[in-house]
Amino acid sequence: MALNERDFFTEQPEMKPMALSCPKCGHRQEYQLRWIHRTKKDRIPAGADERDRALFSKLKDYLVRAEDFATCGKCKRRFEIPSHQSLAMYEPLAGLPVDDYDQ
């Protein structure tokens, strides 16, 4: 029996800012939106077959937006967030200095 894709990840909720424009009044604002951060597990779950092993080797961490609507800060109308902005691949920048950005 094949495993579900969610069996390969651990999920954590996150809040991230996103700049959006209201389609009614055109007001642009940054909104704090809920995202689900799916992190690939360090080893494959038990009960995996060959297909699951091949899939697991290709998986990467990613973010899925959990909210589909936002409320405008100016006109107070609720609007839908475009669906093409609902998934983001997550790749942290490894090897860069954390404290010494000026160097």
Image (tube, rainbow, N blue to C red):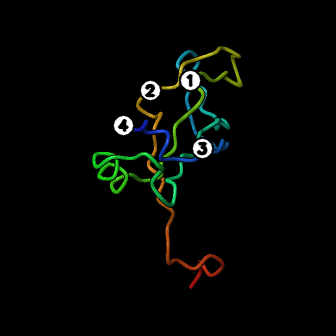
User: Is disc 4 placed on a helix, strand or loop?
Assistant: loop
Front residue of 59 and 33: 59
Please name which of the two marks, 2 or 4, marks the residue nearer to the observer.
4
Measured Cα–Cα span from mark 2 to mark 4: 29 Å
* Location of residue 101 in the rendering, given as x and y in whole percent from the top left corner: 59, 77
* Mark 4 crowd level (few <14, some 14–19, many ≥20, 10 Å Cα): few
Measured Cα–Cα span from mark 2 to mark 1: 8 Å
Q: Which residue is mark 1?
A: 68
Front residue of 99 and 7: 7
Q: Which residue is mark 3?
A: 11
| Mark 4 and mark 3 residues within 8 Å of each other at the beta carbon | no
Measured Cα–Cα span from mark 3 to mark 2: 21 Å
| Mark 1 and mark 3 residues within 8 Å of each other at the beta carbon | no
Q: Residue at x 47, y 47 (%)?
A: 8
- Give the mark nearer the N terminus: 1 vs 4: 4
User: Is disc 1 placed on a helix, strand or loop?
Assistant: loop
* Mark 3 crowd level (few <14, some 14–19, many ≥20, 10 Å Cα): some
Compared to 26, does 57 lie above or below? below
What amino acid is labelled 1 in the image? Answer: Asp
Front residue of 80 and 55: 55
Q: Which residue is mark 4?
A: 2
